[in-house]
Structure formats: structure tokens, C-alpha cells
Amino acid sequence: MTVLTYITDLYNTFFATRSRAINTVFVTVISLLALFAVPTLANEYWLQAILIPFLIFALAALGLNLLTGFAGQLSLGTGGFMAVGAYSAFKMTTAWPELDIIAVFLISGFFAAGVGILFGLPSLRIKGFYLAVATLAAQFFLIWLFNRVPWFYNDNPSGTITAPPRTFAGVMITGPEAAAEVRYLVALVLLAVFVFFSWNLMRSRFGRAWMAVRDMDVAAEIVGIPLLRTKLLAFGVSSYLCGVAGALFVFLYLGSAETIAFDVNISFLVLFMIIVGGLGSITGSIIGAAFITILPIFLTNLNPILGIDLAVDLAKHIEVIIFGGLIIVILILEPHGMARLIQVSRERLRI
Amino acid sequence: MSAEARGGHPTPGEPMLSVEGIVLRFGGVQALAGVEFTIHAGEICAIIGPNGAGKTSMLNVLNGAYQPSEGVITFKGRSRRRMHPRTAAQEGMARTFQNVALFKGMSTLDNVMAGRNLKMHSNFVACLLPAGPARAEEARHRAYADEVISFLEIEDIRNVPVGRLPYGLQKRVELARALAAEPDLLLLDEPMAGMNRGEKAEMCRFILETKARFGTTMALIEHDMSVVMELSDHIIVLDYGRKIADGTPEEVRNDQTVIDAYLGVATEDDD
């Protein structure tokens, strides 16, 4: 294929219709803002407490959404698969300090993918809630494993893993001295790359096979889709993304962590993100992650802004009540999540 | 030359599929008790019979959804003791279901494209990219899928999720998905069930046009006798899991066993 046909091909992919052109402009504007404006404008608190965890959770949500929203395999093992990524990144970078840290992140995903495929094996026989329980077993087993085998945290008496200082192209990316802007940009670029790949993958034969298995596995089999291979690939790809997210969670956000950082709450949190954002929607994963990570912080800051003086613990309780209430309201308004809500409003406005 | 010698593509008139001594048991119940018949290439073969005669079970045995306890299935010159749904698809068998088995969350186009998945071979890495060999393959197959879509006159609903479509159109999308696989043998389980007269006539036309245009061999289950007589070249009558008649529509219409077991009921009602 010549360069010219490749370019026309690319052009057709992005600008074939008006709505695609609008999407492209939108994505470009957001990317430019995220790349250049945000790191200069946002302060340390915004980057460290809001934007970095948002990006990392968006990656984990993307991973889970590929498995649950697209391939229809309910999983509660997200926290466990993230832990596999985090611990393998820690083991690799402490064993081979000279290994490029970005490469470490990318390779750590493969360990998570392997574990994900292993725990995805029962999916041929069991479905729905039963599969969720099986993945929950994976969650508990993996956390137990990382707790009980000191080898995973290099026999550290405190039982924690700590991100050592590592550079990429001369810039400090991890460790106590790494700037928040740099960590933000690394997370942003990795998320963007994986969103881009996922977007293409879902429009290929693999994405269709996943959705076919989700919608009706009997029919998928009679059109010749291999069920086990398709489901295991979904587990593999999903766990890969969750694994990378787990590595980033420790190395770019927490700095150091124990297994408690990856407990079952994380699995539920990421599941909430994709339900609120929209099952089977890539944008939905990001919107859901934004909603779940940013809204509580917004609510916390609402009282001082409005000038209401509440006791700290009372404010915290009200915050949780409002947060839960909003999730229910959104799901009643649009059971298919916020991505669908946006899509419907766009159709109404004809843009 | 035999079908096997030419790499398994029977020419019209040669046996496409034959079964011998098929026995299927569910617990103590015998759904099929030693059925044998042959479907020849290029024909439309109707499998009829009263409710519970074992018609759908027979179709399920043919494409491997059920495993018979006894018997041999010979498809395109290759004999097997049992089929597997995926093998059947790979060998060129496609089917539709009595109660529509579509991918409800996917668009009409995606459903039809899913019917072609066995013909697509792009590797995983190529599929991650927005252009290149995987996209080129995708475009080629989309062109064929669009041909099938316009053949069945469902262009208007090309991008609509099929879950939102009325039943009659879903049946047509399901036929489109099966045709997209370019099958040698198409199994249709009650393609006109639950349709009104107009929709039935339309579906009849599509089935006949499919035969004319693609030369697809078809085996269909149908209850409406006028439809069966109009469409089929060959009729197999099942009753209580046994074959009671096998022949041209003319022969079957005049067969006394068939009249007694099945058509006779209608005659008595008329009196």
C-alpha cells in the first residue's frame, strides 16, 4: 500500500461523515487542551489528587468495559488484575533497574493478561453472575497471594511496594522527585494510545466477535465464531489494560502501596464507572471514570464555595448521599449510561 | 466425478447432504428414530410434519447443535458421526432459527458482517490500526455485505440496532446474515413463522431469488402448506421422529400415509 492510499484511507476513516468530522475536531481540541493547557494551568493538587487518578481509572475502566460491555463477561476481578500489573512492574524494575520504565509498564500488562486468561477459562462453562463470582475468587486469591508471599514485595518488612526513581529520556517519571506534570502526561499519553487502539479494535472482526458472543453465544457459534478463543482474548486484552493501569496506579499516583490498595472495592468502583458511563462504549469508560473520581471532590468543595458552614463529618455524609443519589438519577434517566445520554442529545441537536 | 474428488463442491443434482439412521434421544424420549434422507445440490427441500415430529431436532442434528446417538451425516462427500456448529459453518452450512437468534445490540450491517467472520483473517495487531490491511479487508467484506443487504432490500435499516426492528425485518436480517457466509447449504427453521400474508409472500420471493441468484441449496421447515408446495422441489415428511414420506410435492401430496398422518387432519376439518 502506497503512502498516498494510506493517507486517503486515514482521511476516509476520520472525515467520511459530518458527525465524524465533528468528533475528530472535538477529540483534537480536547487532546491539545489536555496536552498543553492543563499541565501549565492546573496546580499540583489538581494534577495529583484529581487528574492523575482519573486518567488511571479511565484506563482500568476501558479495560473492564472491553470485557464486560463489549464481550459481555461480567468481572469483579479488576482490582486483582491491576495488582498483578503493579507487582510485576515492581518486580521487574527492581530486578532490572536499567530497563526503561515505560517498557516496564507495557510489559507488566502481559503478566496481568496471562493471569486474566487463566481466570477467564471458566467463562466457557459459566456465565453472568456465576462468572462474576468466579472472577471474585480471582480477586481474593490474587490479593492473598501478594500478601502472603514476601517475594512479591522483595521481603520488605512493611509489606509495601514503593516506586523507585526512574527516568525516561532523561526526565524523572516515577519516584518522589517526579513532577506531577510529567506523571500526568505519561498517564495521558498511555491512555490516549490505548483508547485509540481499542477504538479501532472494536470496529474490526475482533470487536464484532466479542459483541456477537455478548448478544447471543449460540448464534455466534453457528456463524463460526470460536467461543473459548474469543472470550479468552477478551479476558487477555482487558486484563492487559487493567494491569497497565495497576502499574500506573502505584508508580504514577500512590508512590507506594500495599495490597489493600487493590482490594475488592476497586473492582466495584471500576464496575460502577462503566455502568454509569455506559457499557459497551469507549467514551463511556472515560466519562464514567471522570464522574466517579471527580464528583466526590467537587462535592467536597461545594460547601466552601456556597458558603455553607457544616461540620466536617456531616458534610462528608451529605456528600456520600448526594453521590449515591446522582448515580441512581442518571441510571433512571438513561440506563445505558452517560455516553448514551450524550449521544441522544447530539441526535436531538443534530450535530 | 464425485463430489469428494472435486474438493467437496457438488454440482446440481449431486447429493449435497445425506443422513443415515439418525437416532436422537432426550432421556427416555426418542426425538428421531432412524431417519435417513438425501438433499441434492441446488434444490429447495422442505421438511414438514406435525408439531413434535422432530423437524427442528433434525435441523439441529444437521448443523451440530445436537449430537445424535446413532447415525451418519454426509455433507459434501465427507461422512461424520457428529457435526459441530463451527465445523458446519466452516464447511459451508448456514442456518436461521425459529425464534430469531440475532445479535440484538449490533446494527444490521454488523450482524451481516458477523456472518462473514470465517472469511476474515486479519491479525490482531493489524486490527489495532485505523488503516492498512485489516481496514482494506474490512472494506472488501463490507462491500459484499452491502450487496446482500440491498438484495434483501434492507438498506433503510443498515445502521439500526436489530433489537429495535420489528419481527418480520429481524427474520430478513437473519437470512441476510446466513447468506453473507455464501453457504452451500442453507437451513431455514420456519422462515415465515409469525409473519402476515404480505410478509410471507415477500419472504417466498427472497427464497426463490436466493436460489436463482446464488444457487444455494436450502432445507427449510415450514407449516404453511401453500408455501411449501410453492417453494419446494423436494419434500420430506416426518412424524413421531420417523420419515413417513419423501419425494416431489406431487408425490407427497398424494401419499396416503401423509394424508392420514398430517394433511388428513385438515381434510376432516373441512368436511
Image: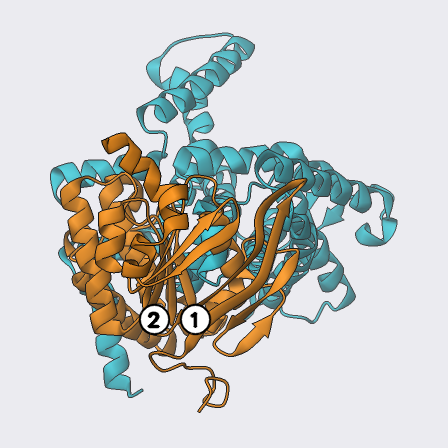
- Residue B182's label in the rendered image is 2
Name the residue at 49% across, 90% down: B5
In the picture, measured across the screen, residue B19 lies left or right of residue B29, that is: left
Q: Which residue is mark 1?
A: B92
Q: Colour of chain A?
A: cyan
**Quadrant housing residue B105:** top left
Name the residue at 28% across, 88% down: A2
Question: Who is closer to the viewer here, A2 or A311?
Answer: A2
Classify mark 1: helix, strand or loop. Answer: loop
Write down the chain letter for disc 1: B
Labels 2, 1: one chain: yes
In the picture, measured across the screen, residue B96 lies left or right of residue A233, that is: left
What color scheme is it?
Answer: by chain
Amino acid at dot 2: Glu
Tell me whether the residue at label 2 lies in contact with that at label 1, contact meaning CB atoms closer than 8 angstroms.
yes
Amino acid at dot 1: Gly
Which chain is assigned orange?
Answer: B
Question: Who is closer to the viewer here, B240 or A179?
Answer: B240
Crowd tier of the residue under label 2, counting other residues whose Cα lies within 10 Å: few below 14, some 14–19, many 20 or above: some
Classify mark 2: helix, strand or loop. Answer: loop
Crowd tier of the residue under label 1, counting other residues whose Cα lies within 10 Å: few below 14, some 14–19, many 20 or above: some
